[in-house]
Image: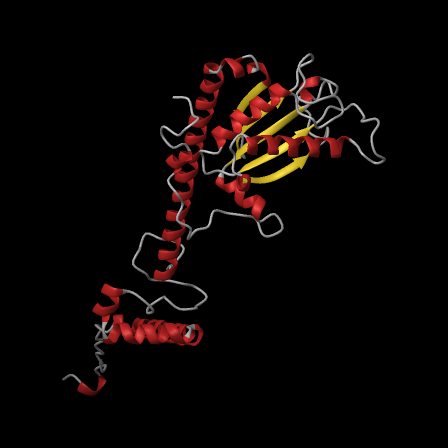
Amino acid sequence: MSDDSSRPIVIKRIKKGGAASHGGAWKIAYADFVTAMMAFFLLMWLLGSTAKGDLEGIAEFFQNPLKLASSGGSGVGDASSIIKGGGKDLTRSSGQVKQGDIEAEQKRLSIKEKKLEFERRERQALEQLKGRIEKLIEDSPQLRQFKNQLLLDITTEGLRIQIVDEQNRPMFDLASDQLKPYTQDILREIGAVLNEVPNRLSLAGHTDAAQFSGGAKGFSNWELSANRANSSRREMVVGGLDDHKVLRVVGLSSSVLFDPNDPLNPVNRRISIVVLNKRTEMAILQEDGPESELDAEEELPPAEQLVPPGAPGLAR
């Protein structure tokens, strides 16, 4: 007979699995919490650093988004914040530009284009005037003989007409502002032509580098060149030039030589007449003021008026 009390007692323990994945769930929850807190603090920082105008614009956008989208104006991004954003042009990388700034820039560009176009047409008209004066010289037996002494070119100031001395044919009496008879004829012809254009004129007298001797004490090439320029002005007025068209008469002595390699060359003795363009005219009128510019609001005349078709005294 077996003894039941001597049998070993066996205890079976069953281990149940299945919840192993629950061990990392808290990490995901914590990451969500940290992300939410970061977003919250970013929101607080943005609200604290946003200008009042931007806040009002944001509020207005959410109240009536279609209004701002269609009409623009002071709203989202259109205020004095440090970093501008938004706007209609999403291709811009530098932020929003106010509607008023865009209109001002467009107006500025329009004015600039208008000025450039006017200056282009003005230069074209001066080129036309140059051609007509050259033809007048060729067609006039009286002026043709002085062709080599009449030099025409276009400069940054306008159309320049220079009447220069030749060795055996000076414009003035020696050391005097008394014009030779043929010089009077030249100046009268030029004066009649230039009176037909609306541009104002500048006259400058030049001498060579030979020192002036004789005459009153203190009288020099400076006074002589100024007197010669003024004598030329008076002769052009006699020829029909309106005296009010002359804007400036100056004497430059030998400070601006035509032939700097030969200061005593007779060609350095000359009278320079400049048909002024609009920009140079304004620069002279505002010499003591700020840098001159064509007035943005000024109604500029058509450049074609510089050389009226069929104007009296102009050779066709």
Q: Residue at x 44, y 73 (%)?
A: 49
Q: Is there any visible trace of residue 98 in the rendered image?
A: no
Q: Is residue 102 above or below residue 46?
A: above
Q: Closest to the observer: 306 or 286?
A: 306
Residue farthest toward the bottom in the current orientation of the protein = 5
Q: Is residue 262 above or below residue 238?
A: above
Q: Residue at x 53, y 23 (%)?
A: 152
Q: Is residue 11 above or below residue 109?
A: below
Q: Is there any visible trace of residue 152 in the rendered image?
A: yes
Residue farthest toward the left in the current orientation of the protein = 1
Q: Closest to the observer: 216 or 81?
A: 216
Q: Is residue 312 above or below residue 262?
A: below
- Please state, as top left, top right, bottom left or bottom right, where the N terminus lies in the image: bottom left
Drawn side of residue 108 relative to residue 65, left or right = right
> Residue 51: horizontal and vertical position, in percent?
42, 73
Drawn side of residue 250 relative to residue 292, left or right = right
> Residue 150: horizontal and vertical position, in percent?
57, 20
Q: Residue at x 41, y 28 (%)?
A: 312
Please state the total of marks drawn on the protein image: 0
> Residue 299: horizontal and vertical position, in percent?
39, 49
Drawn side of residue 31 relative to residue 232, left or right = left
Say which quarter of the image contains residue 169: top right
> Residue 214: horizontal and vertical position, in percent?
84, 27
Q: Closest to the observer: 184 or 274?
A: 184
- Please state, as top left, top right, bottom left or bottom right, where the C terminus lies in the image: top left
